[in-house]
Amino acid sequence: MITVELEVFNRESLGKQANKKYRKNGFVPAVIYGKNKDNLNILVDPIKLKKLLKNDAGENTIIEMKLDKSDLKKNVLLKDAHLDTLTSDPLHLDFYEITEGMDVKVSAPLLFIGKPEGVKNGGVIQTLSNEIKIKCLPTNIPNMIEISISDLNIGDTLRVKDIKPVDGIEILSNPESTIISILAPRLVVETATADTDESSESGSDENSEQEKNTEG
């Protein structure tokens, strides 16, 4: 668990026009919400926030927010970031206020350790997921969950249910969901060949159609 501090400002005006003005002045409109807690509308400096989140915990970093010109402090997690579709700049941020002693639900990144035996023997690793959903106390939020994949051979599949239990953490993801598979080289080649054949057939059909149109 990593905790950082960030000064935020009270957002006195709401609405599209007010938010547009805030963004023009270098701030991002945001809200802090929580279970049985009143919402708090705030303004965040996106540059400072981005720097604070550049650590091993990433978005699972606990942020102690201090409200400007106030003694109010809140421990929060970044829950959602609404981004501009063209620039990817944040338009609005949602923070969840955590309560000491109460579980939170977060996504935990996975760190794969080792080189699979199947890859050493010519197989190809296929990664289907790099994170899992978990529930735990804020103090138990892991920066990442390490998984050894050294023993995986060609044809083996690692599923969520294969992850070793971690004290204080409940895994919420579907136990049958696939995380990693080790594919045989032949399967990879066949898949690529099939894709090529389909493209060729499609191209031939198009050429034939063009010839018909030309003749007509």
Image: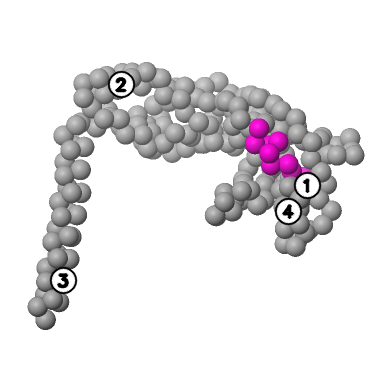
Q: In the structure shown, which secondary structural element does the residue marked by tag 4 occupy? A: helix
Label 3 or label 2, whichever comes before in sequence order? 2
Q: Quadrant of the N terminus?
A: top right
Give the extent of the magenta segment. Answer: 35-51
Provide residue 189's location: percent of width, then percent of height. Answer: 18, 38
For residue 42, the mark is 1
Report the residue marked by disc 4: 24
In the image, what residue type sits under mark 4?
Lys
In the image, what residue type sits under mark 3?
Gln
In contact (CB < 8 Å): disc 3 and disc 1: no
Q: What is the spatial separation of the Cα atoms under label 4 and label 1, in whole angstroms?
A: 16 Å
Which numbered disc, 3 or 1, marks the residue closer to the eye?
3
Res 96 → quadrant:
top right
Q: In the structure shown, which secondary structural element does the residue marked by tag 2 occupy? A: loop
Q: What is the spatial separation of the Cα atoms under label 3 and label 1, in whole angstroms?
A: 60 Å
Provide residue 95's location: percent of width, then percent of height. Answer: 69, 42
Q: In the structure shown, which secondary structural element does the residue marked by tag 1 occupy? A: strand
Q: In the structure shown, which secondary structural element does the residue marked by tag 3 occupy? A: helix
